[in-house]
Amino acid sequence: MYVKCLRLNNFRNYDNEEIEFSDSFNIIYGENAQGKTNILESIFICASGRSHRTNRDADLIKFGRQGYAVNLQVNRKDKETLIQVIYKKDGKKSVKINDIPVKKIGNLMGHLNVVMFSPEDLLIIKEGPSERRRFLDITISQLKPSYFYDLQQYAKIITQRNTLLKEIENKKGLLDTLEIWNNNIVKTGARIIKTRRNFVNKLSKIAEEKHRKITNGTENLRLKYACSFNIENCESTEEIEKEFEKALEKVYESELKRCTTLVGPQRDDCEILLNGMNIKLYGSQGQQRSAVLSMKLSEIDIMKEDTGESPILLLDDVMSELDSSRQEYLFESIKSIQTFITCTEKSFFEGKVPEKSSKFFRVKNGKIL
Ligand SMILES: Nc1ncnc2c1ncn2[C@@H]1O[C@H](COP(=O)(O)OP(=O)(O)OP(=O)(O)O)[C@@H](O)[C@H]1O
Ligand SMILES: [Mg+2]
């Protein structure tokens, strides 16, 4: 698949801008703070319904304006799709596919698949479990809309269950209702856990192989889903449900004391191991960066396998941070997929990307020159 055309209205520092892309390399260059990442961000929103760097849609509206709109034309093997994301200051967000409004943001998933690789992705390794869950959730949601619904549903029930735990402190009579909420989180939660574990296992296999190549066989990269309760012996969703129930029983007293849900997918993590050790604690900066590169390239492979088409790749400022052999490996891996690259120096890519099929865009102060 590839993105043919992008139209922005009052998005970040853009007024009205229309851009036609190459189906191969698109190099977006310019000085700092001119609007390069904003372009990648707008494309990302059309794939996942949200920004990669903020959860607040209001941040995306050009200062002083009333709303923003992003229009994106996507071409794939058998069809053309027009994706529109429109947000108004009063908080209303609407998404249209081929001019038809979709009822839920989840229906947007699957029309455009993107893999984004930016310097902030290092946080997947450096930060706490929530960054890793976010990485898993964003990627899996693009592939499986039902997973996205489960996540939304689960977030709602957890909030309600936590409110109930707080209320029980004063009204012991409410204790009986806790069981109803337990049934709800166990069912939805077990589905989320199973899907995440499958994905992590798949990702681990592919990333291990890629990483071995990137590091000339010197490093072994492995990923493992770390559930907040023991699921080692669970195969089916039902078996995970049973363990989830047991885990809730175990933490019953503590939950009542702390008024919050202590086990479940909202507490899980994904371990990233380099040569058997936690990469967060033992990996050098370069090793961590290479591990993220292996994971991102594996994400591309999984998307291709799942959807039958290559996703598009958004590379924000990452090329210059890789050494030349890693750059070469990256170029080799992405030859046949549409790629958007931001950088400050155009010259960095001249001669490195095929001249005929690549397009260069200079960005200055919210304008494409
Ligand atoms: N809602 C908004 N309205 C207007 N301008 C905005 C808005 N949000 C961000 N900006 C401006 O957009 C610019 C940043 O754009 P962007 O992040 O795309 O820069 P960049 O070209 O990628 O820079 P760098 O090379 O530093 O990464 C900043 O000047 C910022 O003030
Ligand atoms: Mg930027």
Image: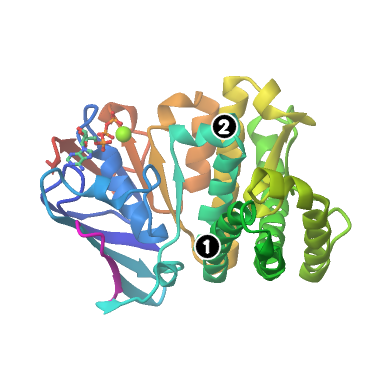
Q: Answer with left or right where residue 91 lies relative to residue 257.
A: left
Q: Say which mark, if any, is on residue 127.
A: 2
> Looking at the image, can residue 152 be seen?
yes
Give the residue drawn at x 65%, y 27%: 280
Give the residue drawn at x 84%, y 59%: 246
x, y percentage for residue 305? Answer: 60, 63
Indicate the quadrant containing the C terminus: top left, top right, bottom left or bottom right. Answer: top left
Which residue of the protein is positioned furthest toward the bottom in this rendering? 100
Please, is residue 4 above or below residue 352 in the view?
below
How many C-alpha atoms fall within 10 Å of the one at disc 1: few (<14), some, or many (≥20)? Answer: few
Which residue type carries mark 2? Glu
* Numbered circles on residues, count: 2
Q: Which of 40 and 267 is in front in this view?
A: 267
x, y percentage for residue 66? Answer: 13, 55
Disc 1 target residue: 156
Q: Quadrant of residue 213?
A: top right
Please, is residue 310 above or below residue 122 in the view?
below
Indicate the quadrant containing the N terminus: top left, top right, bottom left or bottom right. Answer: bottom left
Question: Does the magenta segment cover residue 90?
Answer: yes
Label whose residue precedes the other's in the sequence (2 or 1) = 2
Q: What secondary structure is marked by label 1?
A: helix
x, y percentage for residue 210? Answer: 65, 41
Please, is residue 367 above or below residue 186 in the view?
above
Which residue type carries mark 1? Lys
Question: Does the magenta segment cover residue 95?
Answer: yes
Q: Say which mark, if any, is on residue 271.
A: none
Q: How far apart are marks 2 and 1 (CA)?
A: 25 Å
Q: What residue span does the magenta drawing correspond to? A: 89-98
